[in-house]
Image (cartoon, rainbow, N blue to C red):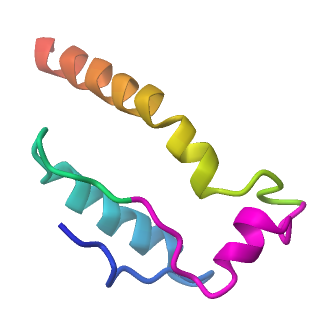
Amino acid sequence: MAFSELKSSAYNYKKTIQEAKSRMSALNLDDKVYLNNNIEYGIGIEYEGKSKRKAPAGMLRINVARWDQIVRAAVKKTKLQLRG
């Protein structure tokens, strides 16, 4: 599933996050998920320290490193919800 048409901006980031969550909830366990940052200043943020205040270590790399932790937490939360 491609999320490339999702666009974010300072004005609609909540809508973008809501849409991404909705699409992620439709994924199956064997689906592939690609994380990317396709904004024009993404390389500057990720590799050149252009966002010293908000994302000094980049955004994509730190979330890729945390991916297993994120998935485990989501699985745990889902199991708890299913037990009710």
Pick whichever, 77 or 46, lies toward us. 46
| Residue at 41% from the left image edge and 72% from the top image edge | 16
Residue in the image at 42% along x and 59% along y: 35
Q: Quadrant of the C terminus?
A: top left
In which quadrant of the rendered view does residue 58 lie? bottom right
Residue 45 position within the rendered picture, expressed as x and y whole percent measured from the top left: 75, 69
Q: Nearer the viewer, residue 6 or 33?
A: 33
Residue 23 x/y as whole percent: 21, 61
Membership of 50 in magenta stretch: yes
Q: Position of residue 24 (x, y in %)?
A: 24, 54
Magenta segment's dominant SS is loop
Disc count in the image? Answer: 0
Quadrant of residue 62 within the rendered picture: top right
Q: Camera-side residue: 25 or 14? A: 25
Q: Residue 74's quadrant in the figure? A: top left
Magenta-colored stretch includes residue 21: no
Q: Residue at position x 23%, y 59% from top?
A: 22
| Residue 30 horizontal side relative to residue 32, left or right | left
Residue 30 higher or lower than 43, as above or below: above
Q: Bounds of the magenta span?
A: 35-52
* Residue extending farthest top: 83
Relative placement, left or right, of 15 versus 63 is: left
Question: Where residue 29 appears, x then y in whole percent?
Answer: 13, 38
- Residue 46 shown left or right of residue 65 in the figure: right
Q: Can you say which quadrant of the picture contains the N terminus?
A: bottom left
